[in-house]
Image (tube, grey):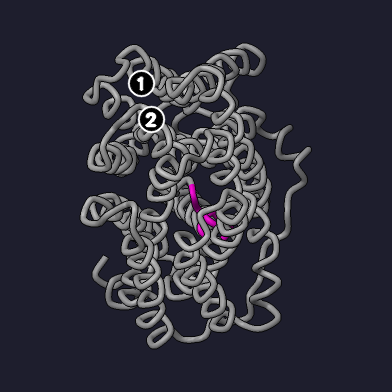
Amino acid sequence: MFQVLSSSWALLLGMFMLMIGNGLQGTLLGIRGEIEGFSTLSMSIIMSAYFVGFLFASRMVPDMIRRVGHVRVFAALGSAISAVLILYPALTEPWAWTVGRVIIGFCFCGVYVTAESWLNNAANNETRGKALSLYMIVQMAGIVLAQYILVLGDVNGFVLFIVPSVLVSLAFAPILLSVRPTPAFETTKRLSLRDLIEASPLACVGMFVLGGVFAAQFGMSAVYGARVGLSVGQISFMVSMIYVAALFAQYPIGWLSDRMDRRILILAIAAVGAGGAVLALLGGNSFLLIVSGAAVMGATSNPLYALLIAYANDYLEHENMAAASAGLLFINGVGAVAGPLIVGWFMETLGPQGFWVYVGALMFGLTIYGLWRMVRRPSRTGASDNVSYTPVMANASPIAVEVAQEVYIETELEEQNEGESLNQG
């Protein structure tokens, strides 16, 4: 871990500041939109726009990097993020925020792709898994800290919009002054969606469902909090608990994932997630139960993302694992784009509690579908055949997922070589 820190501290510090900016603007817009009188439908469109930009960037940014290089792309996208953050309070109109969110989503995805390719280039086979884990911790920590910065300023004013803009601008200094140019940017070939769905229908359906859940928790949780009358401090605490719980749940779930039938674990976690939504729904306006439901949602949805990738890999050949990442990300991205729009309709129709109805319905639906898949197709793998679980955040860019896939492949090949050595001995 010290080796990773010594070689990548500037990149990790810059990403930490970027995640504070991203985490702050998402929650801040949800609260400010309520103050400005935006309808639930308008807020759902605004929040969905982020994932539209993110989805487009995952396809377009690699080509941009190949044409003009990492440094130029990184600097240009960072400048655009900083500008949009300043413009939000100046143009308090739903259409302007929607355009801004598309740009922000596109730019943040591009920044992630660039930074993660630098991180991957700095790591080697021995440190890649540790680098990815440390990167995930830094991202989570940035989002959590952002929620507590929110309570230090006036949501009605400009300062809280200036803070993330300044942080984003400052974040590029340590990165651009310390990293070396990376080699030529390359992406892996893609596995067709049809082949991917045939290999693991449960993983594909699960990734679509989680796209919707993650988009709801990232984009609409603050809107829900404002609608039920929570204070700014309470909303900040609720949102932070989503990510704190996700961070602490990753490793116990990963440990279980490597030692039992992954389908059973997927079903259990999805069922617990549905139960958390029911808990918050029945709790009404009880802040304790709302926070508990939010924590359960985070502790189940984020680890499930990495678990489903690992499960899909159980049914793929080595050469197809990295290629499958693009398909899984696309499926997840489509779910994320649709998520805020659907949850917005639920909240418009059923009131603020429609947020938990939506989350609970998705997690319960994943549980039922998983049970049906278990009946349809017996497991072809045992716990001993599982590829090693690697934690990945649900807002990961294509590069982060490809890095995780490389870790899967390298770990499995090492285990196979060790097994062959023991047999020969």
Quarter of the image for the N terminus: give it: bottom left
Who's the residue at 57% across and 31% down the image? 209
Mark 1 Cα within 10 Å, few/some/many (few <14, many 20+)? Answer: many
Which amino acid type is marked by label 2? Met
Q: Is residue 136 above or below residue 218?
A: below
With 129 as the anchor, is 50 left or right in this view? right
**Mark 2 sits on what residue?**
297
Query: Is residue 121 a member of the stretch shown in magenta?
Result: no
Instruction: Please tell me whether mark 2 sits on a helix, a strand or a loop.
Output: helix
Instruction: Please tell me whether mark 1 sits on a helix, a strand or a loop.
Output: helix
Which of 338 and 384 lies nearest the eye of the viewer?
338
On the image, the x and y values in percent for residue 302 come to 42, 39
Residue 264 in view in this figure: no
**Mark 1 sits on what residue?**
276
Mark 2 Cα within 10 Å, few/some/many (few <14, many 20+)? Answer: many
With 149 as the anchor, is 91 left or right in this view? right
With 386 as the anchor, is 294 left or right in this view? left
Bounds of the magenta segment: 395-401
Quarter residue 212 falls in:
top right
Residue 385 in view in this figure: yes
**Residues at badges 2 and 1 in contact (C-beta under 8 Å)?**
yes
Who's the residue at 73% across and 54% down the image? 190
Which amino acid type is marked by label 1? Gly
Q: Marks 2 and 1, Cα distance to the nearest angstrom?
A: 6 Å
On the image, the x and y values in percent for residue 338 come to 63, 36
